[in-house]
Amino acid sequence: MALQYILPPAPTQNVKSNLSEADLVRRSASRVPSPARQLTSVAKLIDTSKCIGCKACESACLEWNNLREEVGFNHGVYDNPLDLTPASLTVMRFSEWINPETQNLEWLIRKDGCMHCEDPGCLKACPAPGAIVQYSNGIVDFDHDKCIGCGYCIKGCPFNIPRISKVDNKAYKCTLCSDRIAVGQGPACAKACPTQAIVFGTKDEMKAHAEARIQDLKSRGYKNAGLYDPPGVGGTHVMYVLHHADKPEIYSNLPKDPKISPIVEVWKGVTKYAGMAAIGAFAAIGFLHHMVSGANQVSREDEENAKRLAGGER
Amino acid sequence: MTAYDLEPGDQIHVGDPVTVDRYTKSARVNHWITATCLVLLALSGLALFHPSLFFLTELFGGGQWTRAIHPWIGVVLFFSFAGLFIRFWRANLWRREDGTWLARLRDVLAGNEENLPEVGKYNAGQKTVFWGMSLLIIVLITSGFVLWDQYFAQYSTIDQKRIAVLIHALAAVVIICIWIVHVYAAIWVRGTIGAMTRGRVTGGWAWRHHRKWLRELVGGRKNPV
């Protein structure tokens, strides 16, 4: 049934990008005209119940994006590397959970990476015009030529995803393989996944596919199986099928109700405008005061008084 | 008379007009280093604060340079301001007349100085600027370290960084407003710029604005010129 989501072979000729500046719906620290066309909303669906933790997705990601991870250490756990890095845009997170109802040990494996929020906190926080963009198909992408390396995206992100490179001081995260999707391909991780735990298609297709998977899981006793498409960030363009959707936090701290931090909202909202207004008001009041009151001048009399005082008269 | 707010180098010279040495050369150099840093910090900080001001990053060689250099300027300012603090803190201690002076802010703004109490080397407005800057610079450097990801990213959580970035922005707005007051006062009260550049004011200026200080100088003069 999932076979219909097997991605087409890569085109070898007449490759034309179907994703351009004209498809932007959001652009950090700047505005974009509303796009002439609306691309179909896309999504990547990660089915944690089908994931076998093989890390083919990690390898495919490194390979497609031409990234090299430093040779690391074995920390005695399956997670390797232990966390996202500027090169590892996706990592598998392994957790061992004892189901209190069945006393079964469940090995929960979650492929972590950018969720491509409909309401992206990174983009809201970014101060560099155009360094973070969102396309009308839902992809949130970083433009490294414009990135200044300030780390504001890290503060904006509700999922702790972006990483700043110590080499070029720029922020990196999953692009959803925007360059592949632009030419009708799916993400490299989805292409590489041997169990089709990662599938890619339109958001509607993925929701329908997830629904079938959830029914299947429920029929096999996972009564809380469900789709993770958190509404607090307007939904995401990377979604999970979870066997225990009522407890997303057991999947290596997947947030239960992620939303852009209210502190970030205040910082990027009222503070920005009130701050500029306050500075402008102080300058304007100074200007007006001088217009109305004139200069505060020392008078001839003041100088005489000073001379008298200095001369000894008290 | 307790000459609590006479600072080293303060001296009166009889002549026409009387002149008064208000700031030593080292105090002035110290002040202008701090001032330069503060202006550069405000420009580079505002560039990242509001998108409409992002063009200011061009002054620093682009966004990456602005991001990299801003915290270092902050460190220079911190030490430079610490120098000013050590010089000026004693004379900026709050005195009884300062409350009265502040309560009559209306007369201050109207230039009716005859209605104001005689004040020492610094009036309540200047003291407010001094203590406000001192406090805010501590807040800014502390929150600034939390935001300095290039070297200190691992020492704080993302939640702490979020709080720090908001505090940093708010404190920066307030300190810029205080700076505007400071600069405006120096322009509005004629004769003040000379104190900041050449270190000297006229006797009349001291009589008009800091009469208690002038009286202390006259009273404490050991070697009349």
Image: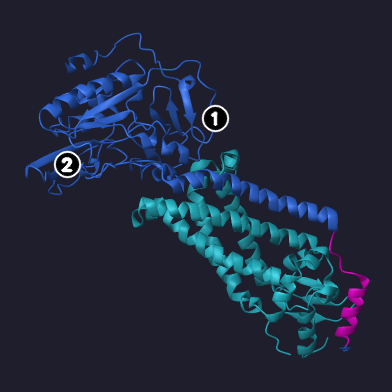
Chain colours: A blue, B cyan
Near mark 2 (Cα within 10 A), the count class, few <14, some 14-19 or many ≥20, is some
Residue A244: numbered disc: none
Which of the 4 image quarters holds residue B108?
bottom right
Instruction: Identify the residue at image location x=15%, y=31%.
Output: A49
Q: Which residue does the image show at 74% across and 53% down from the upper left?
A: A285
Chain of the residue displaying label 2 = A
Residue A268 image point, x, y percent: 51, 43
Upstream in the sequence, badge 2 or badge 1? 1
| Residue A289 quadrant | bottom right
Q: Specify the quadrant that holds the C terminus of chain A.
A: bottom right
Q: Which residue is mark 2?
A: A94
For the N terminus of chain A, the quadrant is: top left
Left or right of B37? Residue A296 is right
Q: Is residue A276 above or below residue B21?
A: above
The amino acid beneath tag 1 is: Arg
Under circle 2, the secondary element is strand
User: Hey, which quadrant is residue A5 in on the image?
Assistant: top left
> Is label 1 in a helix, a strand or a loop?
loop
Q: Which residue is mark 1?
A: A31
- Magenta stretch: give its range: A295-311
Where does residue B180 sit, x and y in percent of width and height? Answer: 68, 56
- The residue closer to the viewer here, B203 or A229, is A229
Residue A301 part of the magenta segment:
yes
Q: Nearer the viewer, residue A228 or B178?
A: A228
Vertical position of residue B3 compared to residue A15: above or below: below
**What x and y, as percent, mark residue B136?**
55, 63
Q: Is residue B196 visible?
A: yes
